[in-house]
Amino acid sequence: MASQAQLDMLTKIKSDNGFIAALDQSGGSTPKALLLYGVEESQYTNDEEMFTQVHLMRTRIVTSPAFNGKRVLGAILFENTLDRQIGGKSSAHFLWQEKNVVPFLKVDKGLLDETDGVQLMKPIGDLDSLLAKANAQDVFGTKMRSVVKLANKKGIDAIVAQQFEVGKQILAAGLMPIIEPEVDINSPEKAAAEALLKSAILVELDKLDADLKVMLKLTLPVEPNFYQELVKHPKVLKVVALSGGYNREEANRRLSENNGIIASFSRALTEGVSAQQSDDEFNAILDKAIESIYQASIK
């Protein structure tokens, strides 16, 4: 049974303008994120210290006056962030109660090696307990990423089937899954892979019970508005786009060409901010970044 907070979050995602901040770098991607923020690997000696450093970075972002529910619809966290506090509250409760920003949780455990031109998700052994933890903190939804490298129908069908299989488990727990089969922006077969991906997603959407909806997180396509069938599909709550390695200017440009799709950017959001900046400088740079992504999302 959804909490009142989760019902209010659904209304916000459905009806408000804005974008989703992806603050969910974990494990292997954390050192790079910290380095871009100006924190050298020499400044921490183990995973616990590393995650403390990245939590300080995220705390600075979400407590900034620039970061609030007027332009930021939601934020994706990873489990370590969910287990920590911001401003004396659990991270998820702080986001919603203090910032009016909808919390999501990254639930995947990383990727398997490439097979048939794709990287499937590793098994998520403790998913039920993770979903229970998310519900206890009024988290609205989840995110899980897998990657398409080549236009291989067998691989793409497998990746989409896996995403929806896990997605149904998440729906059964009362949470909103963000289905994320990312197409590598450097794929030599990107457009062909996108065509296969769209077809496979449409097949899975049509199998869903009529009262169920999912969210989709997709790479910005080669052909503008290529995913309009998905944007308008009755079983899709929202389509969001990842920046995928594009810089913010390029990601915003591509996003603005795709009607009805909003941003869910990570590196493109935090581009330009650093640990060495004063609070005034940091907040000004973040405000400019948030405004540019917001404008690209509401076109």
Image (spheres, rainbow, N blue to C red):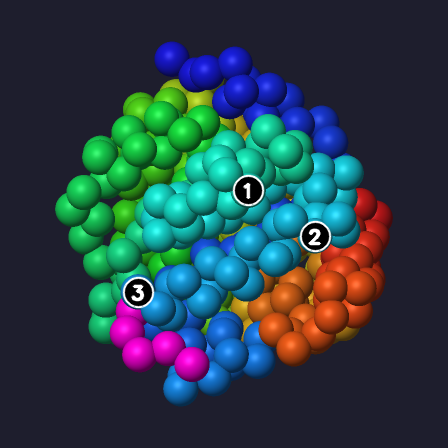
Q: Position of residue 175 (x, y in %)?
A: 40, 29
Looking at the picture, tell me which residue is in the foreground, 144 or 133.
133
Q: CA distance from mark 1 to mark 2?
A: 12 Å
**What residue would you read off at disc 2?**
64
Q: Residue at x 41, y 62 (%)?
A: 52
Residue 48 bears which disc, if any?
Answer: 3
Secondary structure type for disc 1: loop
In whole angstroms, how far apart are the C-alphas of marks 3 and 1?
Answer: 20 Å
**Amino acid type at mark 3:** Glu
Toward the viewer: 277 or 103?
277
Q: What's under tag 1, amino acid-wise?
A: Gly
- Crowding at mark 2 (Cα within 10 Å: few <14, some 14-19, many 20+): some
Q: Residue 266 is drawn in which quadrant?
A: bottom right
Earlier residue among tags 3 and 1: 3
Magenta stretch: residue 44 in it?
yes
Residue that carries the numbered disc 1 in the rendered image: 87
User: Residue 197 at x, y = what percent?
Assistant: 46, 56
Task: Give how far across and how far down residue 24 sits, in percent.
Answer: 46, 56
The answer to which of marks 3 and 2 sits earlier in the sequence is 3
- Give amino acid for label 2: Ser
**What percent of the width, then of the height, locates residue 224?**
72, 60
- Quadrant for residue 17, please give it: top right
